[in-house]
Image (spheres, rainbow, N blue to C red):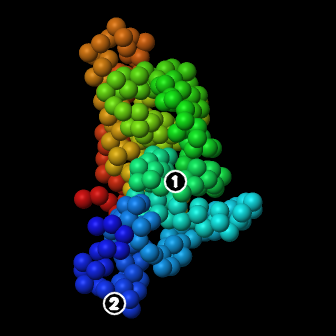
Amino acid sequence: MRGTAWYEAAGFGRPALRSEIRYALNAVLVLKAVRPSHVWIMESRRERLWTDFVEVHDTDLFAHVAAMTAQAPHPDQTTWRVRTNLVNLCLVTGRSLTELTGADFISARRELMDRQRVGHRMHTTWEYARRAGLLPGEPDYMLQVTSAPPLTPEQLVARYNIEDPDIRAVFVEYLTERCTETDYSTLNGIAIHLLGKFWCDIQAHHRGIATLRLTSEQATAWRTRVATLSNGKPRKDWAQLLARVRCFYSDISHWAHEDPARWARLIRAVSAMMSSSSSSAISATRPRTSSTPAAP
């Protein structure tokens, strides 16, 4: 049911009662007990929702973004719109600011425009999010994603500084194979997880590494690092990240045996990968930390 029509349907017709219900709904939304749609938020009158939300979630990061928008040509309007969009994205996706993805912004813009909305300055919000260090791996301007044609596997890999040429070739070949069976958004997500959150982290902690074969210690250390975000909170896409990395190892091994002619130059890396304990270590349960309970 759109807008505020549900108040009448639920028997909350009196203005005073409506106000109380709105405040109660704010609490439910701030606690992320429900995940509304972008259109529902825009069509519903919300009192203090955005202010209440930033007092509870990512307060310092929201303040950092606000300090930048305060320098905009129209600071009050820009600050309000950027903050509102970021809060709405967190509410709809259930993510924190640092967990938001480019796909979340694009999906929100598409949903709003499909309902004859104007996009609510989502491009501006993207720009300030990038300035604040959010959306890692994404371009600085949303227009580069919404207007440009999809990147090729080579271009997706080129977004990340993969140092070893042979390992870079493996990732290009892998994404080339996967792009035949998946849509671009999913392919881009695989690239973000596999290259940005997995291999870039590995090579940052093991300078000069020239093999995909990880020791049990290396794999376990990586799992521990990515289990939590920089703010100490558990990573919500942790299970999906590990699943994609394990799928990468499994796929490469399978394809190498199925089509050795195509994968001949990768055979050495493949056999090294799957003969090690990398795959089993990566697929283990979430490590125990002070802020991250073990998975059941």
**Disc with the residue nearer the chain's start (1 vs 2):** 2
Q: Name the side, left or right, on which 173 lies relative to 203.
A: left
Residue 278 in view here: no
As displayed, is residue 105 above or below residue 199? below
Which residue is farthest top? 261
Residue 14 numbered mark, or none: 2
* Identity, as a three-letter code, of the amino acid under mark 1: Val
Residue at 61% across, 53% down: 124
Quadrant (top left/top right/bottom left/bottom right) for the C terminus: bottom left
Residue at 32% across, 60% down: 294
Q: Name the side, left or right, on which 43 lies relative to 201.
A: left
The count of marks equals 2
- Kindly indicate the quadrant of the structure image that contains residue 6: bottom left
Residue 256 in view here: yes
Query: Residue 25 versus residue 67: which sits nearer the camera?
Result: 25
- Secondary element type, mark 1: loop
Q: CA distance from mark 1 to mark 2?
A: 32 Å
Q: How crowded is the residue under tag 1: few (<14 C-alpha within 10 Å), some, or many (20+)?
A: few
- Secondary element type, mark 2: loop
Please state the horizontal and vertical placement of residue 289, each as a whole percent of the image. 41, 62
As displayed, is residue 264 above or below residue 270? above
Please state the horizontal and vertical placement of residue 180, each as a whole percent of the image. 34, 23
Please state the horizontal and vertical placement of residue 17, each as a whole percent of the image. 35, 90
Residue 73 numbered mark, or none: none
Q: Which residue is mark 1?
A: 118
Residue at 41% across, 26% down: 175
As displayed, is residue 293 above or below residue 127? below
Q: Quick check: marks 1 and 2 in contact, CB under 8 Å?
A: no
Please state the horizontal and vertical placement of residue 96, each as a whole percent of the image. 47, 61
